[in-house]
Image (cartoon, rainbow, N blue to C red):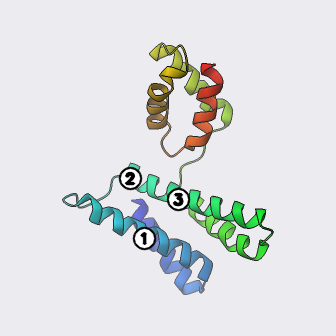
Amino acid sequence: MSLQKQVMDKMKEAMKAKDTVALQALRAVKSAFLLAKTETGVQAELTEEQEIKIIQKQVKQRKDSAAIFIKQDRQDLAEPELAELAILEQFLPEALSEEKIEEVVIATINKVGASGMKDMGKVMGIVSKELAGQADGKTISTLVKKNLM
């Protein structure tokens, strides 16, 4: 079942349960899916990889907003963001541990023959594509920098 279908099913459940927080988060994802479809033009359906990227973007927005609200001591604004974040994360594949990500980074560095920071872009591109949906870019970037120094 595609992620779009799963989101629609969860939206129906949220409507029946009158869960406004879940409904708001799911509507935002549905809207992002529709925007992505209109941007691509000819392509009728989004690929699973594109759907995951859209949801990851929504998750990142919620994390960033919650962090800002917590920093400003606005717990009343942070709580809904964190609740939406929890709802959206259920659509993402299981995240890898930092150790697993580092194993992939080291293997890629050895395979590519990267020797310094000049090769960071090459390594980042390969690792990001390989771990799409399972690790965020910030973690990958940190581990690539650590292992290239």
> In the depicted view, which residue is nearer to us: 1 or 58?
58
Which residue matches tag 1? 30
Question: Which of marks 1 and 2 precedes in the sequence?
Answer: 1
**Mark 2, other Cα within 10 Å: few <14 / some 14–19 / many ≥20:** some
Residue at the spot x=77%, y=67% of the render? Answer: 72
- 76, 73: nearer the viewer: 73
CA gap between label 1 and label 3 equals 13 Å
The amino acid type found where label 2 is placed reads Gln
Left/right placement of residue 62 relative to residue 58 reads right
Would residue 130 be found to the left or right of residue 79 on screen? left
Circle 1 SS class: helix
Identified at 52% across, 61% down, the residue is 58
For numbered disc 2, what is the local secondary structure? helix
> Badge 2 is on which residue?
50
Indicate which disc, 1 or 3, sits on the residue closer to the N terminus.
1
Instruction: Name the residue tied to disc 3.
Output: 91
* Residue 1 shows up from this direction: no
Q: Is residue 15 left or right of residue 8?
A: right
Where does the image place residue 113, in percent across and percent down from the top left?
48, 12
Q: Amino acid at mark 3?
A: Phe
